[in-house]
Amino acid sequence: MESLATLSAAILTPRCHEQLFVRLNLLDVPCLKILISKCLGMGIIAGSVMVKLPQIMKVTRARSAAGLSFPAVLTELFAISGTMAYSIANGFPFSAWGEALFLMLQTVSIGFLIQHYGGRTGRGLAFVAVYAAALQLLLSSLTPPSFVTLMQALNMPAIIFSKLLQVATNYRNGHTGQLSAITVFLLLGGSLARIFTSLQETGDRLLVVTYIVASLCNGTLAAQLLYYWNAGPGGAVTPAKKRH
């Protein structure tokens, strides 16, 4: 109990810590919302450490990135990088955006694997090096705040575009290839939870709308995964799933 109180003192305001853990006033709704938001945020960050690992493992096991769109990965990286830079520039707590860091690392890995298993390892290494340099520049003082805000504003069309690229790839192939269902559904759950945590921790409308758009796009991919669940690389589906 003492360790829990110590943790709460670190993540909550002094007033909320006193209300919830000293006075045990669990009817303080504003503080209760903050506590739920903080716990959700930390849960999302913890989950993000491995959210794309199923996707990475699926690709490495198959030694193929068939069905994965590299342009979609690039566009997703743009959106993730924009969220990181915008949150850091505005001084938002790590619990409000920390998963972006781990998603970025895993998305870069997927981008490299797409190139590597496509027989373009050199191009994959160049992609990693160029992205690392670009990210360092973006997070430096050389980048004006107005540009960072513009990147965040462009996140919505970037997210839509990246997901539509993957949706189009799935539709064209008639199957979802090496796309991991676990990863897609975890991303959907995380983006839905982020709507609430962004409202509570930042109050930033731009960030909230971004996560609403991300949830809609992730939901579309999840629906497509269910639709093509029994489809193989040849695009064949079981009679129950067959398209007319």
Image (tube, rainbow, N blue to C red):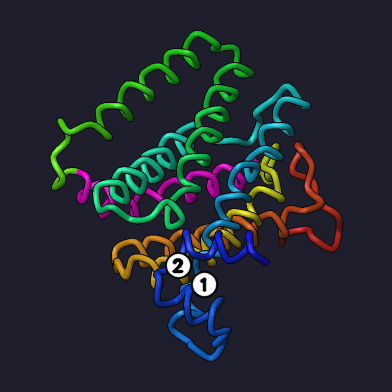
- At a point 38% along the width and 25% down the height, the residue shown is 131
Residue bearing mark 1 = 35
Q: Magenta residues, as a range?
A: 148-173
> Is residue 154 highlighted in magenta?
yes
Magenta stretch secondary structure, dominant: helix
Label drawn at residue 12: 2
Give residue 34's position: percent from left, percent from top.
46, 73
Query: Quick one: which residue is furthest to the right in this view?
Result: 239
Secondary structure of the residue carrying numbered label 1: helix
Secondary structure of the residue carrying numbered label 2: loop
Q: Earlier in the sequence, mark 2 or mark 1?
A: 2
Give residue 109's position: percent from left, percent from top.
56, 27
Q: Nearer the viewer, residue 202 or 83?
A: 202
Question: How many residues crowd around disc 1 within 10 Å: few (fewer than 14), some, or many (20 or more)?
Answer: many
- At a point 48% along the width and 82% down the height, the residue shown is 19
Amino acid bearing label 1: Leu
Give the quarter of the figure containing the C terminus: bottom right
Judge left or right: residue 163 versus residue 89: right
Tell me the CA gap for discs 2 and 1. 7 Å
